[in-house]
Image (tube, rainbow, N blue to C red):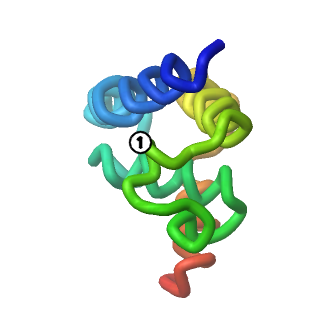
Amino acid sequence: MSIQTLIEDYLTMTRDIMPKMALEFSNNWPVKYDHCFQRIVLDSVCQGVWYKSINRPAYKHLNHAQAITAVKLCNEIIAGKVDLSQLNQQSLTWRGKR
């Protein structure tokens, strides 16, 4: 899959799909805004604060491997295969906010 397609998928999931899913009471997600989903996913991809590894704006500077990992993680979050609350806590820890 091309990097452009991967980035488009990542943006669709973090800007549209996940924020809509966050409004569903049954999900009980700790975040609801697109930039929060992007922070969590990118921090997880980078295993630390993403902007220490990727120039801004991130979606324009992701490499192919990072884009693949971001899309995979988004799909896992959407499918309920990973704990978004745990990913959020780790992201906040990396940022010194927990």
Camera sees residue 86: no
Residue 83 to residue 64: above or below: below
- Give the camera-side residue of 74 and 10: 10
Q: State the image coordinates of residue 96 (x, y, percent, origin top left).
A: 54, 86
* Number of marks present in the image shown: 1
Q: State the image coordinates of residue 29 (x, y, percent, origin top left).
A: 42, 45
Secondary structure of the residue carrying tag 1 is: loop
Residue at the location (31% across, 29% down)?
A: 24
Residue 2, quarter of the rendered image: top right
Amino acid at circle 1: Asn
Horizontal side of 37 relative to 16 (left or right) equals right
Horizontal side of 62 relative to 66 (left or right) equals left
Residue at the location (62% across, 66% down)?
A: 53
Camera sees residue 76: yes
Horizontal side of 1 relative to 29 (left or right) equals right
Residue at the location (50% across, 17% down)?
A: 5
Horizontal side of 21 relative to 93 (left or right) equals left
Q: State the image coordinates of residue 92 (x, y, percent, origin top left).
A: 53, 73
For label 1, count other residues whose C-alpha is less than 10 Å away and answer few (under 14), some (14-19) or many (20+): few
Q: State the image coordinates of residue 73 (x, y, percent, origin top left).
A: 64, 35
- Give the camera-side residue of 78 and 67: 67
- Give the camera-side residue of 23 and 87: 87
Quarter of the picture containing the N terminus is top right
- Give the camera-side residue of 12 and 98: 12
Residue under numbered circle 1: 28
Residue at the location (59% across, 29% down)?
A: 71
Quarter of the picture containing the C terminus is bottom right
Residue 44, quarter of the rendered image: bottom right
Q: Residue furthest bottom?
A: 96
